[in-house]
């Protein structure tokens, strides 16, 4: 379990992380979201013990990162932002170095290195120097070193940044497979990734937590949650027909297509059945009619802009 | 194998993975040859010792050691690998010492490869090999002093060229500290103990006596403490600077 209490980090006058509190349990895949400069990477650097906190504590399975850093670090695998690795070493040499530092000796080293090479499919480039590898391979080398010791806690800073769609898919599958009995924290600004792999999402802005929940819970905060999208053949006044429905909040015209309308539900109540009844009774000239899920992007923009507006 | 040894090995191998180690060694040997035989007048002196060889070492190190020390920490910060290294379960002390020792071993290898000069002097005459051995050891310790300064300067900046220039400047200061030119420049009113302290910090003060065969444990102690102090300073600087 990771426990983060009152975590604060100041750089000179600037408060990068402002009194952060949360706990992450085994089996959770936590997506860490936020605009650029919100403090995602700083938080990860504090959790992994690279930076020391100005105030507050980080505990990894009961080990305080500032008091017993070696024990806490031994439990974690970390992929720093940009997946740095020693460019003049070959993939194999680099991974063998990591295996040694992680405490493996003798034949175990070969076994572990071979295991991670298979896991992230790096066998083809194992004898190439890292500087000659493509971005995707470099990122996989970074992932390989992070999972070397089968860590209880895996912290990945933008693990799929710069990968092509196939590689992204592969990394996400890898994270899902790893996640069962572990804690995984990934930072990302790709919102689809959160829906794809995370069981929980935290959105931070200006060093504060502004939203925390499952991706579905966050989506339901969107004004588009349960909204009914309608495409019409010809213009028709939807609003007058809908005035009788109390759960309908508004009707919004699509910005790009003037024949597409979104009927928004108030407080995310299900309105699909009611709207479709009216549509049939009044013979709306529809060609498309479907209910939409909330959009994480919309929630992300709303909560991160609220806090900026408040300051 | 402890973490210190693992880091030392990785660093040392990375010197030899690039041409750096080879270039360093080759130029060190060529420069030593030229300085000893041509500039130092090894043959003309007609004496069976290696004084002309050792007396150029402070000046040779001044330009060569920063080249291997400059990347110690600057490159780690520039490429971001420092974040990887310092989030592994190792102590900062192991990282600082391991990197320093790797560079020190490299200078040791270069120094060892000057053995043909020792063979030459033994072929030509009958030198005091005890003195020569002590001078070799002294030279290696002095190289360690230069490297320790370089380690600290390298921790100060992400730019290895700046680290190199800073290292040369500070090393130069420590080399000339004990020289008479500088000591005579002190005005009369400066108390003698200050001048003595100042002179005692100079590399030449300690190395000259070692090179001449005066084996004083205090000279070795000086370099050991000097190295330890600069390595501690490196650790402090790394801790302070790693955030930016």
Image (tube, coloured by chain):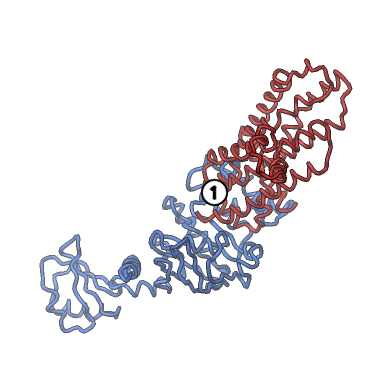
Chain colours: A blue, B red
Front-most of residues A48 and B114: B114
Looking at the image, is B60 positioned above or below residue B187? above
Query: What chain does badge 1 belong to?
Result: B
Q: Position of residue A50 (x, y in %)?
A: 56, 59
Q: Where is B194 relative to B29, above or below?
A: below
Q: Secondary structure under badge 1?
A: helix
Classify residue B13 by image quadrant: top right
Q: Residue furthest top?
A: B44
Does B183 sit above or below residue B95? above
> Residue at position x 68%, y 23% from top?
B30
Q: Which residue lies at the image location 66% right of the left edge and 46% below the top edge?
A: B99
- Specify whether A166 is left or right of B66: left
Task: Judge the density around disc 1: few (<14), some (14-19), many (≥20) Cα neighbours within 10 Å.
Answer: many
Residue drawn where x is 53% and y is 46% of the image: B157
Residue B99 against residue A170 in the figure, above or below: above
Q: Position of residue B62 (x, y in %)?
A: 64, 34
Query: Residue A194 falls in which quadrant of the image?
Result: bottom left
- Is residue A166 visible in the rendered structure shown here? yes
Residue A265 is left or right of residue B239, and the answer is left
Q: Horizontally, is A251 left or right of B37 in the view?
A: left
Q: Is residue A293 visible?
A: no
Quadrant occupied by the N terminus of chain A? bottom right
Give the labeled residue for mark 1.
B77
Query: Residue A152, image x and y in percent?
Result: 60, 66
Please provide percent x and percent y for residue A285.
Answer: 13, 70
Picture quadrant of residue A34: bottom left
**Which quadrant is the C terminus of chain A positioned in?**
bottom left
Count of number-bearing discs: 1
Question: Along the line of sight, which residue is nearer the eye, B75 or A254?
Answer: B75
């Amino acid at each position: 379990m990771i426990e983060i209490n009152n975590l604060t980090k100041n750089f000179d006058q600037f408060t990068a992380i402002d009194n952060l509190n949360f706990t992450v349990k085994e089996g959770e895949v936590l997506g860490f979201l936020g605009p650029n400069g919100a403090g995602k990477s700083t938080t990860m650097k504090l959790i992994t013990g690279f930076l020391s906190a100005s105030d507050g504590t980080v505990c990894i399975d009961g080990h305080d990162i500032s008091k017993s850093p070696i024990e806490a670090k031994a439990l974690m695998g970390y992929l720093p932002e940009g997946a740095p690795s020693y460019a003049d070493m070959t993939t194999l040499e680099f991974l063998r170095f990591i295996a040694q530092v992680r405490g493996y000796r003798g034949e175990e080293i070969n076994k572990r290195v071979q295991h991670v090479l298979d896991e992230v499919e790096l066998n083809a480039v194992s004898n190439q120097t890292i500087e000659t590898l493509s971005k995707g391979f470099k990122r996989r080398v970074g992932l390989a070193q992070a999972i070397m010791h089968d860590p209880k806690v895996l912290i990945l800073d933008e693990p799929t940044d710069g990968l092509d769609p196939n590689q992204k898919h592969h990394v996400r599958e890898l994270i899902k497979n790893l996640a069962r009995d572990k804690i995984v924290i990934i930072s990302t600004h790709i919102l689809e990734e959160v829906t794809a792999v995370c069981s929980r999402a935290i959105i931070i802005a200006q060093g504060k937590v502004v939203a925390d929940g499952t991706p579905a819970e966050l989506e339901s905060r969107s004004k588009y949650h349960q909204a009914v999208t309608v495409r019409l053949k010809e213009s028709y006044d939807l609003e007058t027909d809908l005035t009788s429905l109390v759960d309908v909040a508004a009707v919004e015209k699509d910005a790009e297509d003037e024949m597409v309308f979104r009927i928004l539900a108030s407080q995310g109540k299900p309105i699909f059945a009611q709207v479709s009844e009216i549509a049939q009774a009044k013979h709306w000239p529809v060609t498309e009619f479907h209910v939409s899920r909330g959009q994480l992007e919309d929630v992300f923009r709303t909560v991160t802009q609220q806090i900026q507006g408040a300051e | 194998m402890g973490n210190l040894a693992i880091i030392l090995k990785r660093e040392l191998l990375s010197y030899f993975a690039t041409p750096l180690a080879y270039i360093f060694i080759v130029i060190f040997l060529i420069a030593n040859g030229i300085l000893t035989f041509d500039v130092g007048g090894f043959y003309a002196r007609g004496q069976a010792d290696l004084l002309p060889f050792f007396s150029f070492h402070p000046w040779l190190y001044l330009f060569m050691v920063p080249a291997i020390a400059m990347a110690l920490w600057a490159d780690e910060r520039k490429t971001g690998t420092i974040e990887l290294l310092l989030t592994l379960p190792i102590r900062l002390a192991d990282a600082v010492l391991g990197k320093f020792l790797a560079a020190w071993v490299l200078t040791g290898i270069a120094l060892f490869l000057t053995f043909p000069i020792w063979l030459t002097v033994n072929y030509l005459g009958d030198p005091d090999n005890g003195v020569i051995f002590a001078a070799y050891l002294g030279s290696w310790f002095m190289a360690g002093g230069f490297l320790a300064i370089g380690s600290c300067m390298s921790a100060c900046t992400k730019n290895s060229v700046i680290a190199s220039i800073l290292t040369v400047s500070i090393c130069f200061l420590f080399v000339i500290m004990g020289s008479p030119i500088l000591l005579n420049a002190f005005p009369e009113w400066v108390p003698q103990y200050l001048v003595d302290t100042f002179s005692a910090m100079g590399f030449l003060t300690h190395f000259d006596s070692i090179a001449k065969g005066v084996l004083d444990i205090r000279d070795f102690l000086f370099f050991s403490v000097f190295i330890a102090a600069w390595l501690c300073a490196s650790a402090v600087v790394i801790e302070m600077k790693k955030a930016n």
